[in-house]
Structure formats: C-alpha cells, structure tokens
Amino acid sequence: MIKIKIDGKALEVKPKTSIIEVADKVGIDIPRFCYHKKLSVAANCRMCLVEVKNFAKPLPACATQVMEGMEISTKSKFTKDTQKSVMEFLLINHPLDCPICDQGGECDLQDTAVAYGASKTRYTEEKRVVFDKNIGPLISTDLTRCIQCTRCVRFLKEVGGMAELGLIGRGEHAEISAYVDKSVESELSGNIIDLCPVGALTSKPFRYSARSWELSRRSTIACHDSLGSNIEAHVKDNIVKRVIPKENESINECWISDRDRFSYEGLNHKDRINLPLKREKNQWKEIDWEEAYELIEKNITDIDIKKSNKIGIICSPQSTLEEGFLLKKIAKELNTSHIDYRLLEKSFSENNNWLGCKIDEIESHDAILVVGSNLKHDQPLLAHRFRRYANKRNNFSIITSYDDFYSTRCLEKVIVNPSAYINYLLMILKQVQLSTKYKINSEVIKNLLKAAKPSNEAKRIAKSLLSNKSKAIFLGHQILHLDDGDNIKLVAMHIAQAVGATFGLIPGYANSVGLNELNLNTDNISADKILSQSKEAYIMMNFDPLYDYHSPKKINSALKKAKFNLAISPYISDSFKEFDVVLPMTPFTETSGTFINMEKTIQSFSAVTPPVGQSRPGWKILRVLANFLQLEGFSYDSSEEVKTDAMIEMDKKNEFSLNDFKPSNIERGLEVLNVVRANDSDMIVRRATSLHQNKNKDQSCCLINPTTMLEEGLIEGQKIKISSSEAEILINVKADDNVCLNAVVIYGKQDETFILGMHNKVKIKKA
C-alpha cells in the first residue's frame, strides 16, 4: 500500500491504481466522458484533468497512476478552470437540440455542462455537421452530437469481440464510422446506447416514444438464457418502453445482450391472446375463463386416471419454479409421472446439469476447455467472459462444430463433427491417463481407449489441463441434444476427475437448473418417451410445439392421437391447431416467479406491468385449474406461498455421478448442425420485430464447408434439397470455412427450416 492525499484526505491505496479509481472509492466526483471502469483507458476527452502537486500541467485522472506521497486536488481553482475550458471545447460543435434528443434528462453532457461548464458560450463560428450512419435497426445515430469519447469503439472490440466501429479522420474531421457503412451485428451491440455519454447513439425502437422522466423503473430478471441477467424495465402507461441492464457484478456485470434489451417488443405482439380460446370447426372462438375451465374439467375428468400415465405434461425450461412445482403437483394428483421440460434433449442422464462453479469464478481458472457450444449465440454475455479470459491467457481451448468464436485467440480450436466429440475427448483422456495413471472401471471405455491415438491438438489440450493448478471443463447444452450426449458427458467427467478440474455444463434456458433441482421429471421419463406412448390428453405450457420441440413431426402426431389437448401460452399461431383449448398466460414481465440460474443463484422477480387483457400469470392458471379439478392442496394466494412449498421439494444436487458408458448407434450421413441464433431462441424474441429487421444473409442459406461442397459436387448459390426423417426443404448453399467437414449448418427455429427438426441426420441432393 502507498500513502497519498486527495483533497486533503490522507489515504492508503494499492499501487498502480488510477486517480479516478481512488476518487470513486472515496466518493469524490471527477467528471469524465471517455473513462469507463470496464473498458481500456483512452484519455481522449480530457474532462477528468486534475491538479497534482509538483506537476506544472494538469493530469488526466483516468490515465495517471497514484505514486507514493502524491497530493491531488480535484476542487482547486486550477482544476476547475481546466475542466471548464475542456467543457467549453467539447461544446464548440455540439448542437443545441436537447429538446428533441432522446438522451435528454439522462445525458452526462447536460449534467457535466451544468456542474463544470460556463453559463455562456464564446463560440460564434459555424458548427460542423456529421452525416448520420445507418448501423442497423437497433441503434439510431446522430453523429453531430458525438464528442469522440470512443467508448462505443472500445466496447465493440473489447467486449463485443469484433471491431465494428472505428474513429476515422483527424482533428475537426474525426468521426465514428462503421466499416464501409456496415451494420453493427454484435449480440451485445445495444450496450453502446448506455455507454454513449451524449445523444449520438440512442435506441432506434425506443426513439421518440417517451421521455426518461415519464418512465417508471422496475427491476426484473431476463428470461432468455440461463445467465439470469438483472434488468430494469422502464414502463409508461403500463407498457414496457425499453429495457436496460441493472448492475450485478457477479452475474451480468453492467451489460445485457440484445435479446434481453429489445425482446420487450414481442410482449405486445399481435399474436398475444387476451381471452381463452376454444377450437370449433377448425376456428378459434373466444370464451370466458369459467367456460374454459369447465370444458377442461369435463374432458380431464372423463379420463380414467386410475390407470397411470394417461395424461402427458410438457412445459418450457423457461417456466418459473412456481409453475413447475404446480405442474408437478397436478401431475401427481392426476396419477401421471409423464412430465418433462427438456424440449431439445436426446440425452437424459440423471446428473445435475449446472455450471459447476460461480459465474465470476470462470476467469480465475488457469486453463479452460469448452466442448460443444456456440457461445456467441447460446450465451452472448457468458461468451464475453470466456473471450476476455482467452485474450488475457493463452490457455483457452474449444472443441466445436461451427466456429462462431473466430475473433478470439485460443490455445487450441478443434472444429469437428458432433459425432467426433467423443473421439477427441477419448484422445485427451488417454493422454491424461498416461501422465496420471488414472483408473477407469468401465470396460467399454478401457477398450475404446486402446484404439484411441491422441492427435497433436489433443496432446496440447491434455498438457494444458495437466500443467496448470486450477482448470475447468465446460460442456455446452448442445451436448445433451446429441444421441451420444451422455457418453460425451461421461468421458469429459473422467478427464475432469483425472486432472482435478472443475466440471460443469452450460445450461440453455432461464430455469433449466431450477426445474432439474425440482425433479420435475421424477421418473426420468423424457419428453420423447411421453410423446411416443399413447395418451388420452396433453397439457403443454409456455412453448411453441413446432418451433421449440426438436421433432415437429413427432409432437404433431402425438397431439393428433390424443382426445384432448390443452395449451397454456401467451401467443397463438398455426402451431396450436391440434389443441382444443388455449389459455392465455402472461409473459415474464406480467407475473411474479423465481428462476435458478446456471450457477444455482435463486432470483425471484415481480411483475413490472399488469396482465394484458384477461391473460393471467401461469401459476394462477394452474392453481385455479387444480381447484376446478377438485385436487387437494392448491389453496395458494401468492407466488411466494408456492415458492415456499417448492423450495421444500428441491433436491439440491451438486455432484456429477459417473454412470457407465452406453454404446450408441450413430447413423451415417451428413450431420445437420442446428445453430439457434440468440434472436430465435424462444417465443418472445422471435416476435421482437427490430431484432429481425437486420436479417443475416446467411439465415436463408445452409452453410457448408468448401471441401464438403467439392465432394458433394455443389457450387455456391445453387439450390439444394435437404431431407431428414421429418421433412424436405429447398434451400440455397453458401460456403463457410467455419463449418466442420461433412456437416450442414442450418439456422434453427425459423420459418424456412423448423420442419426439418433439430439434430437429425440429413441427405442432400441438387434441386
């Protein structure tokens, strides 16, 4: 520690700390525009200049590290005059358009100008004008207001992972620009709206819709991935007008992904239903709640529930803990254990699937291996932590099938078919075993290891895991979508045990971990098995059966065979044509509930707006449904009461158990890699208009490695037929070096591709 003085206060601080960091810790305000605690130091706005004893000139507080005996003055006349001059300089070309600027009322420039600037301007010359750039449907530009702080440039390079904006020109001609007027496509791009200290970058969907002082700020939890980002919904007239991050250093830091920020547009989509719907002669008819419940009661009570498992129940992994608990309780009362939430999985081990460590502990490891994850799309904010780790240390390795992490430096990057994951992990295990003498009881794995011949990449990954003290192995949730996912998981766990590494799985959805801990699938009966056995009735909650389940053909067939089908959903679409009744539930912003995120942090939230129309929170729908069915134990008056009972049911498993290897028959043929873009992951984001205006040109194509295209006799741009066991589609071909060999990448959960199903073998032929 070193001793310094700041504004006469004697302090002891750590060496290599900047003046501005010291001031922030002790509550001394130093104005700034370019400095941000999460970005590199640029020191180009000069607003934070302060007086330091024995220095003739003022020093930038953001770029100056404290030294022993340093005396700093942030309130002296010299400092104030300096900051006043800088403020005057920054305002020379700034337009006086505060009344029409969306940043008005929350503008750093306004606040700083009042606090540190002059009351009048001395500048009478003509101001410069900068033409606005179109950088996409999410961010509106007014670049004449820009003060060249470069926060946006640094964020997109350091956090977003791609240098999509830059500063061009010099002096008075300097301006922010995208590369050849290209749109900004980072999954985190919306954060530059918050970072911009002026009104140069504002939210395009929010533009001119409300003033900051008209908005009520209400906290909630994002529901689109398993990170559990803390967010703040800004509400006017009971409508969510925008969403911004709420700082939580251990989870989302001070950022959120674009799907968390802009998905609010889907909350009031035309597909929202306000009243219960009944199907009559292939048409939907609106009915009141009492009639809907009586119709459901009649059809459910007609089923002989003395025979077990006559009713199948499937819900979304985005369902709250309270909804999951009530569904499980209803299932028990209706004598069915056929209940599940795993919509995309094909592997169903009983292991507890969580991260294995705290989110903020990821970067504390000395070596990391990630297997089977498209981090950029699956977990945009978690990808930032891995990217930051990889750029700091040359000890990050990844085994994947589609390289969407190409801008990140890696120790080893292995791009192979999903069916080859197991072989690469066996190679690593064999190399590790040679050094550790780790014993394996499984005869199947022993025999497989005999045939394994470690590649150079496998040797280097094994060396990295062996030679470092703290290491971690993380599997993407896509591993569970594969037929041999459990085997991959098992071999990865053996490697982790052999080297003493943290082991974890990166779950895909908001409450995957919570519903797992709730033991929702008590008998470990998968959704696949539920749908393959004949049922009298199905109850499905909070997902689109054709887009969100991995086999549209299978789920459609099962629904057709059942006598009665009930859906509980915020939206209606053609996907629900096989249902008899649809009850309108509210999305996450209009209900209270609890999610358990990937690190097992329990986060409860309240409604930020009242329900739209006569839609109701999911937990209330289930409670009243149980009352109509005359089931016992459903006298809950609040979601908190449901949560209390649900927490008693929780099975807090932290260990991963090693089961035996189960040989699987993997079909031959081209493998289809279903990359689900961040903006297509669920019902709400698929209806957020702005997130889909800048539709990536690759989305209407299938992506194939040039070598595979040559082998198949294909040329770029031609139309081909792709057929799976589900269906056949026509689609254009595009060459992409980031795709592994003998595979086809198709963006999943989209209108053009959903009928193919997910993670099936495919055949291709020229159209």
Image: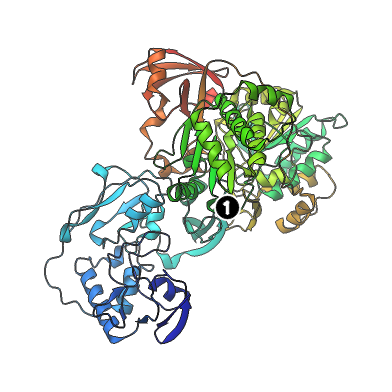
Point out the image quarter for the C terminus.
Answer: top left
Residue beneath label 1, please? 359
Q: How many marks?
A: 1
Q: Out of 317 and 600, give the one closest to the viewer.
A: 600
69 horizontally vs 486: left or right: left
Say which amino acid is labelled 1. Ile
Residue 761, above or below 273? above
Report the residue at 19% width, 76% height from top: 121
Tell me how the rendering is colored. rainbow
Residue 552 vs 638, above or below: the answer is: above
Query: What residue appears at the point 41 percent right and 26 percent down from the top-left corner?
Result: 703
Indicate the position of residue 436 as horizontal and vertical percent values: 65, 38
**Can I make out residue 698 in this image?**
yes
The reply, left or right, for residue 382 in relation to residue 322 is: left
**In the depicted view, which residue is nearer to us: 263 or 745?**
745
Query: Circle 1 sits in a helix, a strand or a loop, which is it?
Result: helix
Vertical order, 330 against 93 (above or below):
above
Q: Quadrant of residue 435?
A: top right
Q: Position of residue 128 (x, y in %)?
A: 16, 61
Which one is nearer the viewer's eye here, 109 or 252?
A: 252
Q: Residue at the location (80% across, 50% down)? A: 634
Expressed as whole percent of the image width and height from the top left, the position of residue 686 reads 49, 39
Task: Identify the residue at the far left of this view.
Answer: 125
Residue 344 visible from this viewpoint: no
Residue at 46 percent across and 40 percent down: it is 411
Estimate how packed mark 1 is, as few (under 14), some (14 to 19) or many (20 or more) residues with alpha carbons within 10 Å: many
- Which one is in front, 33 or 502? 502
Position of residue 656 measured from the top left corner of the image (x, y, whole percent): 71, 41
Q: Residue furthest right?
A: 306
